Every structure is written in C-alpha cells, then in structure tokens.
Amino acid sequence: MAHPVRVRVLSLLTGVTMSATDIASELGIEHAVSSYHLRRLLDAGLIEVVEGGRTAKMGRTPVLYTVSETVDDRLDRSVGTEAAFTAMVADLGRRHRAIRRHRFESDAEVWLRPLVWDRLTALAKEMNAIVVANARRPRTRGTRSGSVTTLVFETGEGPAW
C-alpha cells in the first residue's frame, strides 16, 4: 500500500470507476505499471472489479475498478503505518505544490473530551461520505480538481480513556 502510485490510484478511485488505461493516462504512467499496481491493490482487497463499463476500442469491455467498501477495515492504520503514512504525506506534498486556490486548511494538536472526539470522528466520516458520493471521474466537464485529506487520531499522550 505504501507505494506512491498505489496511494494515488486509491485516491483516484474514490467514488468512481476507472480502467487501467484511464489510470495510466491520468497518472502519466505505462499501462503495464497501472495494471501491476491495480493487481496489488486488488490482491490486498483494497479495490474491487466493477461489472460493466463503457465499450473500449476493438469491441472489448474494459475492466473497471473502484475502492472496496471494506477498504477502511482492511487498512488498519493503528499498527505498522509509518510507510503508508510517509507515502501519503509525500503525495500530499505533490498536491500542495499544485494548489491554485486555498479553500480551507486547519491543523490542531489538542486535548478534547471523549464525547467531542466521538463527534469529531463522526463529522469526519460524514465529510468523507459526501466526498465519495459526489466524486466524479478526472477532468469531467463542470468539475473542479481538488484535494481533501482528513486525519483524526488520538496520540499516546496522557491518560487512556
């Protein structure tokens, strides 16, 4: 999962379906490289094949992929996450360099009551659900390209709740 291409593929497949060709084109990589990373993500259960799809050249129907509904269960971010986190931060740096217009940015290291943490986590999940439900294929007419990153985590400092 920690490979930078896989981080980008998972991000691209948020709420949409794409073929290996679509992904290769969007990322500027070879089709074989795209297929390789899709197979690794598929083997890990992080993405799944979607039936159907538009008709490709030569009458073949391309295989379409999307993020698995169980991706959050499969991406245990509580253990051994340094490599995956490092890859995500590197990709975030790429996105940051591409900023055209700031909308909102926030960072806080805080102490909150357990009920507030629970509410904050629920709001973050709700925001993510909105992003997934409204995501469109790259470069779809009438859309804007942007980045949404949400991290809500408790640190090991202080007493356990």
Image: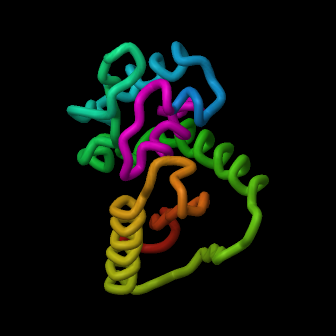
With respect to residue 79, does 123 lie above or below? Answer: below
Q: In the image shown, does 155 or 55 lie closer to the viewer?
A: 55
Residue 44 at x, y percent in the picture? 33, 28
* Model colouring: rainbow
Choose between 42 and 78: the one closer to the eye.
Answer: 42
- Does 68 sit left or right of 13 as displayed? left
Q: Can you say which quadrant of the picture contains the C terminus? A: bottom left
Q: What residue is drawn where x is 62% and y is 42%?
A: 86
**How many labels sit on residues?**
0
Depth check, front residue: 99 or 82: 99
**Which residues lie in the magenta part?**
1-22
Instruction: Estimate the x, y position of residue 19 in percent, counting from the top left.
Output: 41, 30
Q: Position of residue 146 (x, y in %)?
A: 60, 60
In the displayed structure, does residue 160 sit left or right of residue 108? left
Magenta stretch encompasses residue 56: no
What residue appears at the point 42 percent right and 25 percent down from the top-left corner? 38
**Location of residue 147 with respect to 65 vertically, above or below:** below
Q: Position of residue 57 (x, y in %)?
A: 42, 19
Residue positioned 54% across, 62% down in the render: 143
